[in-house]
Image (tube, rainbow, N blue to C red):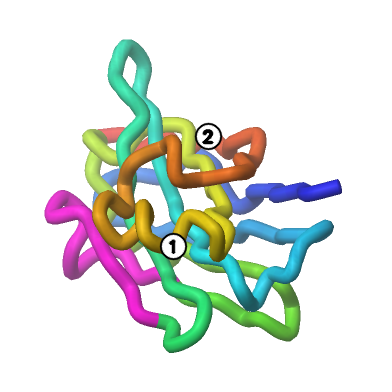
Amino acid sequence: EVQLVESGGGLVQAGGSLRLSCAASGFTFNDYVIGWFRQAPGKEREGVSFIVANDGSTLYDDSVKGRFTISRDNAKRTVYLQMNSLKPGDTAVYFCAASSPRMARQWALSPAAREVYDSWGQGTQVTVSS
């Protein structure tokens, strides 16, 4: 059974930092793209950052470039999202998601499209106070 479990969310003041973790099980982790998404109240779920399986290439939404860093530890089957200089606008539930190799072509065309991800975690709340 594919399982993704996020952790590390919490309440932090503006300018602070958090590190989110996404622990994966039940699939060949090394072959999958992992993405972080977030959803604020009343808003659509949006892609934040993505990390490729083989070469570790990364992508970031413009809103988090320079502040967030995504990384993966294949031995631990975990992807991290280091979030620095947090802003109130970063407040959201953060989800990690896995995109399988069979979706590689679609992912390359649209890495932030939710439909290219096969599995999702339950989410972790991040709240940034002003």
User: Which quarter of the image is occupied by the C terminus?
Assistant: top left
**Residue at numbered disc 1:** 104
Q: Residue at x 24, y 64 (%)?
A: 67
Question: Which image quadrant is residue 27 in?
Answer: bottom right
| SS for callout 1 | helix
Residue 113 part of the magenta-drawn span: no
Residue ID at (66%, 69%): 78
Residue occupying image coordinates x 16% and y 50%: 63
The amino acid at mark 2 is: Gln
Residues rendered magenta in the picture: 57-70
Q: Is residue 97 above or below residue 26?
A: above
Residue 68, image x, y percentages: 31, 64
Give how far across and how far down residue 48 sits, in percent: 32, 50
Where does label 2 land, which residue? 125
Q: Residues within 10 Å of mark 2 (few under 14, many from 20)?
A: some
Q: Residue furthest top?
A: 42
Q: Secondary structure at mark 2?
A: strand
Which residue is at the front of the view, 130 or 105? 105
- Look at label 1 and name its amino acid: Ala
Residue 101 sits in which quadrant?
A: bottom right
